[in-house]
Image (tube, rainbow, N blue to C red):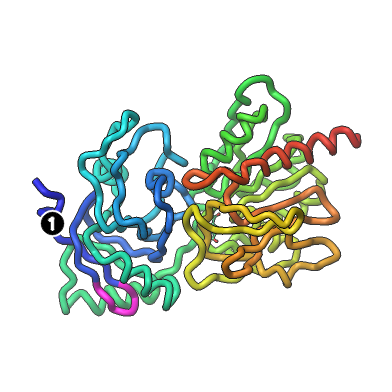
Amino acid sequence: MSIYNADHAWLMLADGTTYEGRSFGAKGTAIGEVVFTTGMTGCQETLTDPSYFGQITVQTFPLIGNYGTNDDDVESDDIYMKGYIVREWCDSPSNFRATERIDNFLKRHGTIGLFDIDTRALTRRLREHGVMNGVITTEPITPENREQLLAQLGAFVIRDAVDTISTPAQRLYPAHGPRKYRVALFDFGYKRNIRESLRARGCDVLIVPARTTAAELAQLKPDGILLSNGPGDPGENVQVIENLRDIVALGIPIMGVCLGHQLMALARGGKTVKLGYGHRGGNQPVIDFETGRTFVTTQNHGYAVLGDSLDPAIARVSHVNANDKTCEGVEYLDVPVFTVQFHPEACAGPADTSFLFDKFLRMIDKQKEGK
Ligand SMILES: NC(=O)CC[C@H](N)C(=O)O
């Protein structure tokens, strides 16, 4: 049976634009912020990236799921996005690692899917208007429920994102091979490959809850601290930002990724803004001012640090996005801290900047030598 015989499903945006397509994955109704990603591969990594909490994700690439899914390529144990939209999905995946079809994978996680809509038109709309709230549903939108749904869309905000998904308890993952250092990885909704990139480099990784304080860290005595990626508006994490001010003062080397980068900037007096439609995908060019090189990076963010808002006496913008010149990295001058907006751990997307984990370890080496 063709996938095009599937039941109907809909997406309605907050401006009332409605797209009718077909259902795959779970059935139901969910409201979220509709965003698009330009990733051409790695749909499973995208689906399981916790930073998509509260969002409905559109893949701009027109055919998704042709190599299926498996138990290994997940970035977390769950799907945190509210809905998933593709132009076409493949019900006969062909790959020796595939164990499941993408619609089963979505069903198993209760994630509502929609396909067979004009994803190009939808993406252009989001690009022109900025991201918008939307409702994805397998129930017909009628003149009766339409007004009520539009009111709900108008009121929807992603809230308590980090607090909802951060781990309540510490957990230790041992280094792969001989142990060199112990790193505390703040779980703001961390991607698995951040953890694995550290373990592969000889680090025991201690996952710690988002609200871990400087006093608790001082007891744990990690050699380094990694601030993870994570969902939502960075500014809502008031307590975490407050804690980071004291954590920086411990003098332990810190690397920040994506949300971690934004939270550090806020803790050090900087500001963040919401971008029109963000950067999501595996083809974002980033200029490194130190070397003048441009790297193609993996990204998934809707907010950005305002480079000019940082005090030049303590921070320097180290990277910018070559497309829109937004801040993509900060080097702090008075403490051993650097942060990046893009994803050195890749997954999905290019691994060209994985050397930043080595830079982090060198920073720890240097500090140990200095002692
Ligand atoms: N991947 C992330 O860490 C995203 C950070 C933040 N939630 C944003 O959208 O900008």
Residue in the picture at 77% in, 52% down: 246
In this view, the residue in front, 65 or 322, is: 322
Relative placement, left or right, of 315 versus 59 is right
Q: Position of residue 150 (x, y in %)?
A: 30, 76
Quadrant position of ligand 1:
bottom right
Label 1 neighbour load within 10 Å: few <14, some 14-19, many 20+: few
**Label 1 beta carbon within 8 A of ligand 1:** no
Relative placement, left or right, of 351 versus 371 is left
Count of marks placed on residues: 1
Q: Position of residue 354 (x, y in %)?
A: 62, 42
Q: Which residue range is magenta in the image?
A: 13-18
Residue in the picture at 69% in, 53% down: 339
Residue bearing mark 1? 7
Q: Amino acid at mark 1?
A: Asp
Q: Position of residue 331 (x, y in %)?
A: 76, 55
With respect to residue 183, does 137 lie above or below? Answer: below
In which quadrant is the N terminus drawn?
top left
> Hey, which quadrant is residue 293 in on the image?
bottom right
Answer whether residue 110 is visible to the viewer in this image: yes
Q: Position of residue 18 (x, y in %)?
A: 24, 73
Residue in the picture at 32% in, 67% down: 120
Q: Find out whether residue 16 is within the magenta segment.
A: yes
With respect to residue 243, does 276 lie above or below? Answer: below
Residue in the picture at 72% in, 57% down: 292
In which quadrant is the C terminus drawn?
top right
Relative placement, left or right, of 262 versus 94 is right
Report the predominant secondary structure element of the magenta stretch: loop
Label 1 secondary element: loop
In this view, the residue in front, 50 or 131, is: 131
